[in-house]
Image (spheres, helix red, strand yellow):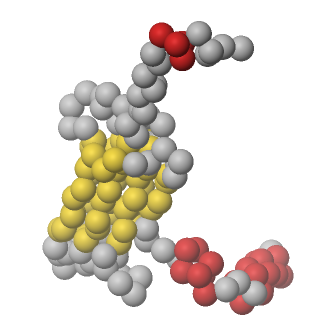
Amino acid sequence: MLKFVIIVIVAASVQLSNSNPAQLRAAFSNNLFECDPSRANVVVLQRILQKQGRPRAYIEEALQFPRIGLFPRPITCIAVEDLNRGGKGGYPEIVAGGVYYNSVTLSFKSQLEGSLEFSILIYTDIPRPLPYLGSSQAQNVSFH
């Protein structure tokens, strides 16, 4: 059993050493980014979440969007950035809904004795109206 554990650790460290710095930052990031970039064009929520840490305790917080009911358009992007640098921040997680849903619930948990400080952006899309078709143009439109 011990040989298996050592092999797994060595294999993981070899794989990390072959990664570029951007990949390493993404692998150990406390940020959350789920997005359909082709549709995310309107910010519907922009918020900074800040909660001070406490001795020998974790901080937990939840955010629900919208607060009650469903948003009229599907969410197209959720971008949560940990503003605490150096790996000292907390951990965001989508616990309900999300991208392509009409609501989302985010959960945040600090590290032991750590604080929470996140920038939260939620996007949706605005459907583009169909172009106005005058009577002469309407005859040239075909639907297959």
Instruction: Classify residue 22 by image quadrant.
Output: bottom right
Q: Is residue 66 left or right of residue 123?
A: left
Q: Residue furthest front?
A: 136
Instruction: Classify residue 15 by image quadrant.
Output: bottom right
Position above or below: 131 against 97 = above
Which is more toward the observer, 22 or 111? Answer: 22
Instruction: Kindly tell me whether residue 24 is visible in this rendering.
Output: yes
Position above or below: 31 against 33 = below
Residue pictured at 53% horizontal, 48% vertical: 38
Position above or below: 5 against 128 = below
Provide residue 45's location: percent of width, then percent of height: 26, 50
Provide residue 46's location: percent of width, then percent of height: 24, 56
Residue pictured at 41% horizontal, 32% vertical: 127
Q: Is residue 20 left or right of residue 38?
A: right
Could you tell me which quadrant the N terminus lies in?
bottom right
Instruction: Kindly tell me whether residue 58 is visible in this rendering.
Output: no
Which is more toward the observer, 107 or 39? Answer: 39
Residue pictured at 27% horizontal, 77% vertical: 114
Which is more toward the observer, 63 or 13? Answer: 63
Provide residue 11's location: percent of width, then percent of height: 79, 81
Position above or below: 66 against 120 = above
Q: Is residue 114 left or right of residue 98?
A: left
Provide residue 116's location: percent of width, then percent of height: 25, 70
Q: Is residue 28 left or right of residue 132?
A: right
